[in-house]
Image (cartoon, grey):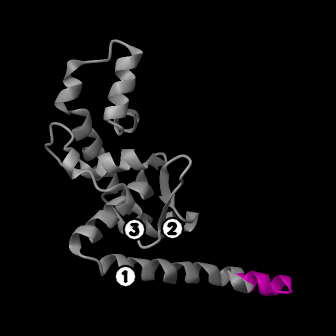
Amino acid sequence: MDSLGRQHTRKGVKRALQSLPEEFDETYEEAMKRIESQDSQKTSLAKQILSWICYSIRPMTVMELRHALAVELGDTDMDEEALPDGEDLGSVCAGLVTIDRDSNVIRFVHYTTQQHFVDLFPRAHAEIAKTCLTYLSFDRFKEGYCQTDKNMETRLRDYPLLGYASQY
C-alpha cells in the first residue's frame, strides 16, 4: 500500500496495484498461521467466526454472532454458559475482524478478507442453516407467535439470533 504513494507515473501505479493481491494473500496467510498457533478451542472459535462473517447474508451484531456460536445441534434452548465472551470474538481472529462500536456489528477489517477466505469454508452454508434451524426449534418458540409487540421485543432481546434465523 505504501508503494502506491511513492509512484510518480501511471505505469508505476498499475504495477504497484498488481502486486497488492499478493501482499494481501501473504497478510491473510500470516494471520491464519497465528490463528492456528492458538490452542484448539480458540482456533476452532476463530474459524467459526470467520465462517459466519464470510457467509452470513447480512452483517451480524456481536450478540447475534455470540448466540450463533453457542448453539449446538440438538439444543432445545440457549445455554447462556456456552456464549463466547464478546471480547474473544475479535481477539482470537488475529486482527482479521473488527467490531464497529456504534452499530456493534462484527465484520472483516477489509473487503478483500472475505474474498480470500470464501473457499476456506466449503460447508459454511450448511452449518449456518443447521444452526438457524436448531435455534428456531428451541422449546421457547413452540408457544407460537407473540401476542403483543412488547412480547416480541422481549423475545428478540432474549434471543438475538431469532431475527436473523427467521429471515434467512
**Is residue 65 rendered magenta in the image?**
no
Q: Distance from label 3 to label 2 (Cα)?
A: 16 Å
Q: Residue at x 25, y 38 (%)?
A: 135
Q: Element type at marker 3? A: helix
Residue type, numbered disc 2: Thr
Q: Residue at x 67, y 81 (%)?
A: 18
Q: Distance from label 1 to label 3 (Cα)?
A: 14 Å
Q: Element type at marker 1? A: helix
* Mark 1 crowdedness (10 Å alpha carbons): few <14, some 14-19, many ≥20: few
- Whether tag 3 and tag 2 are in contact, CB under 8 A, the answer is no
Which label number is shown at residue 33?
1
Q: Position of residue 15 (x, y in %)?
A: 73, 86
* Mark 3 crowdedness (10 Å alpha carbons): few <14, some 14-19, many ≥20: some
The kind of secondary structure the magenta stretch mainly shows is helix
Which quadrant holds the C terminus?
Answer: top left
Q: Position of residue 29 (x, y in %)?
A: 44, 80
Of the numbered discs 3 and 2, the one sitting upstream in the chain is: 3
Which label number is shown at residue 91?
3
Q: Residue at x 28, y 71 (%)?
A: 43
Q: Element type at marker 2? A: helix
Which label number is shown at residue 113?
2
Q: Nearer the viewer, mark 3 or mark 2?
A: 3
Q: Which residues are magenta?
A: 4-16
Q: Is residue 75 above or below residue 123?
A: above
Quadrant of the image occupied by residue 39? bottom left
